[in-house]
Image (cartoon, grey):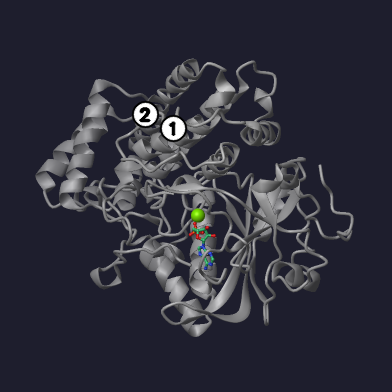
Amino acid sequence: MNTNPSATINNPICFQHYRDLPAEMFAESMPAPSAAPSLIELNTNLLDQLGIDSSWFGSQQALSVLSGNSINEANHPIAMAYSGHQFGNWSAVLGDGRAHMLGQVKTAEGRYIDLQLKGSGRTQFSRGGDGRATLGSVIREYLLSEAMAGLGISTTRSIAMLTTGDSVAREQLNPGAILVRSAESHLRVGSFQFARSQSIQTQSIQAESIQAQSIQEDSAQPPATIDGVKALADFTIVRHFPELEQSSSKYLDLLSAVGKRQASLIAEWMLVGFIHGVMNTDNVSITGETIDFGPCAFMDEYNPQKVFSSIDVQGRYAWDQQPTIGQWNLTRLAETLLPLFDDNEEKSVEMAQQRLAEFIPQFQQSFQAGLMRKFGFTEGSDQTRQLTTEMLAAMEADGVDFTVFFNNLTRVAEGESEPVLINLFNDAEVASSLIEQWQALRAKDSDSLLSMRQANPAVIARNHQVQFAIDAAVEDNDFLPFKRLCRVLANPYQIDPADHELMAPPKSEQRVTRTFCGT
Ligand code: AMP
Ligand code: MG
């Protein structure tokens, strides 16, 4: 473990565990200075939950460190290396092109969490770009990641947001900002791909068609030295999966553990209508946290093929494609680990395939269980499954808002009269008949009602509300809509009457139909 002797007693960022990794996995990199930094938001709730003293984060000294102005205080920051399949196309070197890992903070429970600056300037991994982030993109990530946490879904978090006082040129000049992001880990499937491609000194992992779930191993390559991957896998197990350390098949178990977390993460996303939008292997967290909130969005009306990202023209990352892509990404992880499974390559492939085959059933199990909870059914039976399929089909046919439907369904279960539900559909007759069947099948005890409520948020981070908060901040320097949305999204299952307008789907002129990989 590396500690930083120069850290002052008050600065809690005093570890840099990634330095234990092979040297090629990161590069020393200093954040760029900011002209006139200002702290806009500090997530004291999160710091309190973690048992981390927030007083340092509110200090001038912290502002100086987090804005890149105090190099001595910074904890020997690094930019991390990773590769990635982006929309299926292989990029051998990506890495943090606009992010700096400051190090880890120890929580009251004795866990370590990463603190990373995003938008803090160029690194050796910046191919193009200025290394900066716009205020709009930082607000977006802050809101969406905190919304995810409010929903109880595993995610990287936002510790703080600051403006830099510099302008960032995109289509127009934008205020520059930095997000202080926390995570259990910033290791990605792409980190393993990078380690593997370094080990074999060649880029044999090629782009392939989306249908290909099969494992690719280029047998024409010289025998790989697998030291880098092994070091990364061992680091990951020790830091994040210590329960696997004693296992005789720990690398296979690591693959399964990552798969399990990803399968349930994707199920949870889908159950709240979330579309990640850019599930490239460099955006798949090894610890199963939601990471990279570029073009992501929650859908309004239910449409399984829904895509928001402006660059996802083929619908590769559509709402209903996410489990298949999750398995595709996990297969890419398995490829990097193959030599660790067994000396015999054929045997390794067979072992990996067995583990990979568990992914879709695991997803299905989480998704179906969650869907039953959303409908207030205690168990899945042929009848309940049939009815949920029919209800979803009716919602799709009539363009019913996903979140409003399940919230109103819960309200009816809680005793409200049925028109709040029936009125959402164009065809009242079909809707009434489905609701009658649902009433006969649903559980009516208080535990089930509570569980149903906790599966159905009243409010999500709707695109038009996020856009409204961004516009107010960027155009009018008004952060009140951002702060209000943040407060409401922290507790999405209960909403104050004064905030009810935030539940409403967009009016036609408010609709956001496209999202962008915001930089
Ligand atoms: P992201 O959208 O953060 O997942 O970025 C994808 C890749 O592009 C990563 O390697 C980033 O570090 C890099 N990148 C994105 N935006 C910028 C920027 N403004 N300057 C430099 N590199 C960037
Ligand atoms: Mg990314």
- Mark 2 beta carbon near ligand 2 (under 8 Å): no
On the question of residue 412 being in view, the answer is no
Local secondary structure at mark 2:
loop
Q: Is residue 326 above or below residue 47?
A: above
Kind of residue indicated by mark 2? Ser
Residue 311: image x %, image y %? Answer: 33, 59
| x 43%, y 59%: residue | 461
**Label 1: element kind:** helix
- Residue bearing mark 2: 214
- At label 2, counting other C-alpha atoms closer than 10 Å, the crowd grade (few under 14, some 14-19, many 20 or more) is few
Q: Where does residue 128 sit, x and y in percent of width and height?
A: 51, 67
> Could you say where residue 200 lies in the image, as x and y percent from the top left?
56, 36
Structural crowding at the residue carrying mark 1, measured as other residues with C-alpha within 10 Å and reported as few (<14), some (14–19) or many (≥20): many
Q: Give the numbered dot on residue 331.
A: 1
Q: Name the one closer to the observer, 421 or 89.
A: 89
Task: Give the camera-side residue of 319 and 213.
Answer: 213
* Callout count: 2
Viewer-nearest residue: 413 or 277: 277
Q: Amino acid at mark 1?
A: Thr
- Residue 34 position, x and y percent, is 67, 77
Task: Give yes or no for contact between labels 2 and 1 (Cβ–Cβ under 8 Å).
Answer: yes
Name the mark on residue 111.
Answer: none
**What separation in Å lies between label 2 and label 1 (alpha carbons)?**
7 Å
Asked whether 452 or 91 is in front, the reply is: 91
Classify residue 453 as left or right of residue 115.
left
Query: Where is residue 60, by image quadrant?
Result: bottom right
Q: Is 147 above or below relative to 342?
A: below
Identity of the residue drawn at 58% across and 72% down: 177
Residue 226 shows up from this direction: yes
Quadrant showing the N terminus: top right
Residue located 46% across and 72% down the image: 469
Earlier residue among tags 2 and 1: 2
